[in-house]
Image: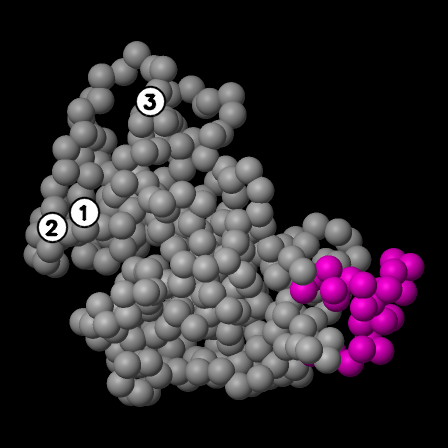
Amino acid sequence: MKLEILQVPECPNVVLLERRIAEAVAGEHIDVAITHRVLDDQAAATEAGMTGSPTLLIDGQDPFAEPGSVPSVSCRLYRSDVGGIDGAPSVAALRAALNLAPADQSTEMPAGPVDCCAPATGDESPVAALGAWRGAAQPADPAEKAIHHAILRAFATRGGPPPITEIDAVAAEFDSSAQQILDRLHASDVIRLDRSGRIASVYPFSATPTAHTVQIADGARVYAMCAIDALGMSAMLGGSEVVIDSADVSTGEHITVSVRGEESTADPATTVVFIGAQSAQGPSADTCCNYLNFFTDRPAAEAWSASNPHVGGIVVDLADATRCGAAIFGPLLNT
């Protein structure tokens, strides 16, 4: 069986893909030969059928191809087994593509909570870490979930957090203390409280101005914590159209993005997103949000990244960034 990895130069997710292939075939009587083809321009990507890096071909076919995907030299994102996004197919998905029986247990899931954007291992990308953290930061407790939903809906309809009286009323339905629930949500980084105990943010919304302003159709004008949060709002709100006003952080040039579900268009059309983070532990608001930004084009984003080596990250096309946001925030009000 021939496996070929199509990639851009120095793709950060190739090592992750190689490791998962090794895990997928471990202990199996299967002869696998892996080769690499490095592509650095659009024409080469089109000829090879690379719809983002890395693309895995198994005997010349892409088993993970999605309808509507087009060849590109951008980073490619994959859906994870738990509904998030990742920089490579999961071990389970690879085993299925290789026609291997499902493994008894997956070995790729983290053993505990993942700090935002701090990769669990050195070869995971910021995209994978962001998806893992967001998946872990959704409350399971019924009272916490009810208050979380109430806060999200208040931002979407009124542009800010609900008054404490409304939160008290929801908490009372569960014979719980509103403040204790808010404190737990803060501790698990589902929301952020300011020093006075007031709600400062609930991902994807901020109670104070940010670089990303979002107008929700038939809803409020709100601030998003970051570019990915802004792009995920439409999916979270059932596909309602949102219009994002932002700017290239390196030049200040204005950027407008319209989003419906997982579809987006931008002005300028070359807009991309940098997904990055500092190598530090802590809440998303402190370690990630300042480094998830729009840029007018790939060269601008790459130049900013080169001048800020302390911020690890990757540049992704707007379409992939929109799918990333939708995967993270789409389920929030449906679970």
Q: Which residue is mark 2?
A: 39
Instruction: Find numbered disc 3 in the image and state the secondary structure of the residue it sits on.
Output: helix
Q: Are marks 1 and 2 in contact (CB under 8 Å)?
A: yes
* Residue plotted at (8% across, 52% down): 44
Foreground pick, 219 / 172: 172
Q: Position of residue 156 (x, y in %)?
A: 62, 76
Question: Magenta residues, as a range?
Answer: 161-186
Q: First in sequence: mark 1 or mark 2? A: 1
Q: Are marks 3 and 2 in contact (CB under 8 Å)?
A: no
| Residue 184 belongs to the span the image colors magenta | yes
* 148 sits left or right of 231 in the view: right
Q: Which residue is mark 1?
A: 7
Q: Amino acid at mark 1?
A: Gln
Vertical order, 265 against 82 (above or below): below
Q: First in sequence: mark 3 or mark 2? A: 3
* Cα separation between marks 1 and 3: 21 Å
* 72 sits left or right of 119 in the view: left
Disc number placed over residue 25 in the picture, else none: 3
Foreground pick, 199 / 323: 199
